Image (cartoon, rainbow, N blue to C red):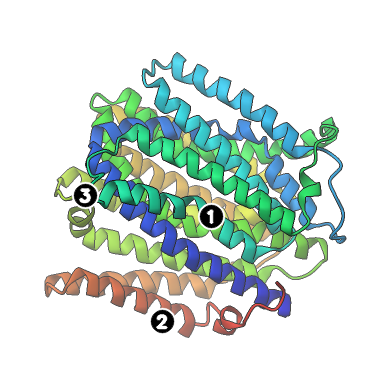
Amino acid sequence: MKKIASFYSSLLWMIVLNLVIKTAWVFGIDRQVQNQVGVEEYGVYFSLFNLSVVFVFLLDWGLTTYFNRQVAMQHSVSSAAPESFLQLKLLFSLIYSIVVFFAAWLTGVQHRDIVLFAVLIQVLYSLLLFFRATLTAKQFFNTDAWVSIVDKSLMLVIAGMMLYYPAFRGMMTIRLFAGLQVICLAVACLIALVCLWKRDLLHFLKFGSLPGMRVFKQALPFAFVVLLMSLHARIDAFLLERINSNGAYETGIYAGAYRLLDATNMVGTLATAFLLPYIAKRWSSNEDISEVVLTGRHFLIMLSIGTGVVALFLGDWIQQLLYHHNDDRAVDVLKLCLPSLIGYSLTQVYGTVLTATGHIKSFCRIVAVFAAINIILNIIVIPRYGAIGCCITALFTQLAAGLTVTLFANRKIGMTIHVRSVFVYIFTAILLGAFLYEGTAWSINPFVLIVLAIMITIGILFFSKLINIRNWMKPELNQ
C-alpha cells in the first residue's frame, strides 16, 4: 500500500510541475514565437521538426525502453547492466543524423540549418530521456519529476526575456529559437548526470562492451514501436507541407492546433513514463496491476473528453486568444484536432501495459496496421483538404488504434474493461457539451466556463469513484 501511495503522490507531483512549466512554455514561448515569426515560417520549422521525430527510433532502437524495463525488474539496487548502452546511443546518434540529412536532401528541403537544429534537439532529448530512464527504473520518481522540467524552465527564462523584455523585442527568429532549445537541453543533460552521480547510478552508464545480438533482438520490437508511433503521430505534418499546394500555411495553422494537442497529451506521456517501470516491476513480482492501469485510463480519458468538448464549443475564442485572428479554417482545424486525444490516451495506457508485460510484438502489429492506414489516408486527403484532412484522418486512426489496443490488452492480460466507466465517460461528454452550449448562449465569460468545466469533470471523476482520492493525497513515503 505504501508503494502504491508513493507512486501516486510522485506521479501527481510530476504532473503538477510539468503542467505549470510546460503550459507556460507552450503558450508563453512556443505560441508567441509563431506569432512573431509568422505562420508560414513557423510552419516550415514545424514540418522539419516532425521529419526529425519520424526517424527518432534510429537514435535508440528501443534500447531506452528495454533498459528501463530490465533495470526496473532487477531486485538488487546495485545490479548493473554489463553492456554499454550509452556508448551505443552515441553511435546511433551519428547514424540518425546522417539518415535525417539524407531524407531532407532526398525530399528537396532547402533549410539545412533548421534541419541541423532539429537533429541536435532530438539527439540531446534522447540522451536526456535515457538518463531519466535510469532514475525511474530505480523508482526515483521525484528526482525525475524535477529533471523533466529543467530544459523548459531555462527556455522560459532566456526566451521569455527575448520575447517580452522591450530591449530584446523583435530579435527572436526561428533559428535562434531552435538554437536556444539546443543549449537548454545540453544543460539539462548535465544536470541529469549530476543527479545520477548523487544517486550512485552512474555505473549504469559506464563504457564497456557493446550489447550483443541477443539484446538487439529483444530490444528491436521497442524500436519498431517508437518508429510506428512516430509515423502515426508526426508524418502528417511533413506530408502536409510537401504535397499540399499551400503547404507552409496549412502546416502553420495545423501546428497551432497540434500545439494544444501536444500540450494536453504531455500529461499522458508523463504518466506512461511512470507506468512502464512501475507496472514492469509489479508484473515481475506477480503483483496486481489492474488498479493502477484503470486509474491511469480514467484520468487520461476524462482529461481528453474535457479538452475535446471545450475545443468544440470554445474553439473560436481559443483561436482569437492565442493567435489574435479568427481564421475560420484555423478554427475548424483546432476543433477537429483535439478530440483525437481520446485515442492517444487509450494507446498510451494499454500500449504501456503490453510493453511492460512482454507483449510488445503484438502491440507493434496493431500500431503498424493503423500507421499504414494513416499514411495512405493522408496521401489521399491532404492535396484536397489540407490540415482539415490531417485532423479527420488522425481522429479516425488514433481512436481505432486506441480501442484495438485496449481490447487486445484486456484479453491478453485478463483485466476487465470496466463497463461502468464507459457510461461515465459518455455522461461526462454529454453534460459538458450541454453546459458549454448553454454557457456560450448566455454569453458567460469563457474563462469562467472553462474553470467550471474543469470542476465538473473532476467532480464526476471522484464522486463516481473512478479514482480513489486517498491514493493521490497520501504523502510520499518511499523517496
Residue 263 versus residue 14: which sits nearer the camera? 14
| Mark 3 or 1, nearer chain start | 3
Residue for badge 1: 269
- Disc 3 and disc 1: Cα gap in Å? 36 Å
Tell which of 58 and 17 is nearer to you.
Answer: 17
What is the quadrant of the C terminus in the image?
A: bottom right
Q: Amino acid at mark 1?
A: Thr
Closer to the camera: disc 3 or disc 2?
Answer: 3
Q: The residue tagged with tag 2: helix, strand or loop?
A: helix
- Kindly identify the amino acid type of the residue bearing the numbered disc 3: Pro
Q: Can you identify the residue that label 3 sits on?
A: 166
- x 48%, y 61%: residue: 18
Up-down: is 384 above or below 234? Answer: above
Write down the residue under mark 2.
Answer: 459
Marked residue nearer the N-terminal end (3 or 2): 3
Q: CA distance from mark 3 to mark 2?
A: 43 Å
In the displayed structure image, the side of residue 58 where residue 376 appears, left or right: left
The numbered mark, 1 or 2, whose residue comes first in the sequence reads: 1
Residue shown at 41% from the left, 36% from the top: 178
Tag 3, which secondary structure?
loop
Select label 3 or label 1 by which is in front: 3
Q: How far apart are labels 1 and 2 at the CA level?
A: 24 Å
